[in-house]
Image (cartoon, rainbow, N blue to C red):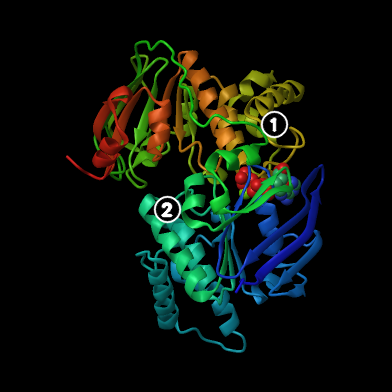
Amino acid sequence: MEAKHRLEMKRISIEFPGVKALDNVNFNVKSGEIHALVGANGAGKSTLMKILGGAYGHYVGDIFFDGTKVDIRNPHDAKELGIDVVYQEVDIALIPYLSVAENIMLDKMANEMKGKHFIRWGNIHRSAREILKQVGIDLDTHTLVQDLSLAEKQMVLIARALATNTNFLVLDEPTAPLSQTETEELFRLMRDLAENQDVGVVFISHRLPEIFEVCETITILRDGQVVADATIDDMTQQKLVELMLGRRFEETYPKIRVPIGDVIFEVKNLIEEAGRVRNVSFSVRSGEIVGMTGLVGAGKTELCKTLFGAYPIKSGEVLLHGKSLTMRSPHAAVSQGVALVPEERRKEGILVDEPVFINLTLPSLDKFTRGPDFVNTRAERTIARQVIDELGIVTPSADQKVAYLSGGNQQKVAVGKWLIADAEIYIFDEPTKGVDVGAKRDIFELIGKLAKQGKGIIYASSEIPEILDISDRIYVMYDYAIVKEFETAEATEEEILFYSAGGQ
Ligand SMILES: Nc1ncnc2c1ncn2[C@@H]1O[C@H](COP(=O)(O)OP(=O)(O)OP(=O)(O)O)[C@@H](O)[C@H]1O
Ligand SMILES: [Mg+2]
């Protein structure tokens, strides 16, 4: 027997000032199936799921749940139906100064507290532990959420969704911060929910192989409209990408060869105060793209932050053009020619409440100032527009608040601002996380251009194929230290994995 539709969204449209985000979208999901929702950055995926989660009340169109017409206008309406949406913006969905247990049990506690005046903390922690076990993650429930890694926060959000009865679960790019093992664990959980508990699951991801691994059906959005609805067996990766981008697309990235010069950046026996960098030495030459790889948690982000002056140095030296850098703060790093595109962009990379052009020109503001107070905003906007075009940032104008851009387009802003600033060393920490295949290529091309100008590039990523594509030389990290160096031409994925896992 054909399973019936758990969810039917019919002729859904929504507008924001200057943007028609969704245009007559039909979206159906059966119970017990894992359904992929894919599309380029800004296609409307998150918006459609936010409507389902009750975040936007001003959409038009109809929603049916288990065959009954429902009216979802606020988060409470969605919760009542057992719809849980785990949003892309992990950091704003949790309460940082509360414990893991409190965050997971929040909704449940609120329900149970009605008319009562005490909380059984023992029970709260016990229940939270049970749910975490179901999610397959080992976490102390007393830890404060602010002390968790991005991956752990993601798992806590999923656990929170499961704490209340779930009929329908939406995961908006859940795997972006997860390691391979964590991803497998999440897939196991998704399958269990779909197969054994008849939950409808929507999965959003820019990693296409994951879509083919875990989903049965797929809907593709382009510019706010549905361009395909299919079973996964009728789809190929190539077809998917072409439907998504609306043009032919060459998967592999041809590396731009540039002449590599002398060493310009040197790190000698670097030790971070809290042990987050352990005796690291390496070098970068002019025009060279150096890949820094290793598993999630190997210490890449910590190294990047230390090189950017955000973590205190205990001993060791960092030299640019043979001159020792004083690394007291990110500000000092920027003024000495070091730029960082950080991993947690919403927290560290951009000002979400400011317009796109302000964000893009911020690190290079001195180029736009004359005298002490006068900022030439016209020049700022002109340059900003160039970067918007170059990176294909989807925004109605340079004046749009960054908060209103899609996740991937926010990432492009975080990358784009350093293209205007004139640094010597560019550090990219997982720059392609959350960007679609087309935009990834744009970012690769831009990094190639920087290399061509003779800049030095440190490219940190746990995506080994990506590292093999773009870098000239590779360092492998394990347990906060560099354990291996490769010329890219001589490296293989298997070998890199071997050293990443602590092999010797
Ligand atoms: N609150 C808002 N105000 C204004 N515009 C918005 C708002 N939310 C979304 N948009 C716009 O709607 C479009 C769709 O955005 P959405 O976040 O749904 O894209 P997405 O498919 O999830 O992309 P990504 O893969 O980058 O996460 C974008 O052009 C975005 O800028
Ligand atoms: Mg999104």
Q: Position of residue 432 (x, y in %)?
A: 51, 37
Q: Position of residue 216 (x, y in %)?
A: 54, 58
Left or right? Give the position of 205 relative to 355.
left
Left or right? Give the position of 211 relative to 409.
left
Residue at the front extreme of this rendering: 1
| Residue at 68% across, 20% down | 369
Q: Position of residue 134 (x, y in %)?
A: 41, 71
Q: Residues within 10 Å of mark 1 (few under 14, many from 20)?
A: many
Left or right? Give the position of 136 relative to 49.
left
Q: Residues within 10 Å of mark 2 (few under 14, many from 20)?
A: few
Q: Compared to 461, does 143 lie above or below?
A: below
Left or right? Give the position of 160 relative to 53.
left
Q: Which residue is mark 1?
A: 357
Q: Amino acid at mark 2?
A: Ser
**Of residues 186 and 157, the one drawn nearer to the viewer in this rendering:** 186
Q: Position of residue 123 (x, y in %)?
A: 43, 82
| Residue at 50% across, 36% down | 431
On the image, which quarter does residue 281 sit in?
A: top left
| Residue at 51% across, 75% down | 197
Q: Amino acid at mark 1?
A: Phe
**Of residues 114 and 313, the one drawn nearer to the viewer in this rendering:** 114
Q: Which residue is mark 2?
A: 149
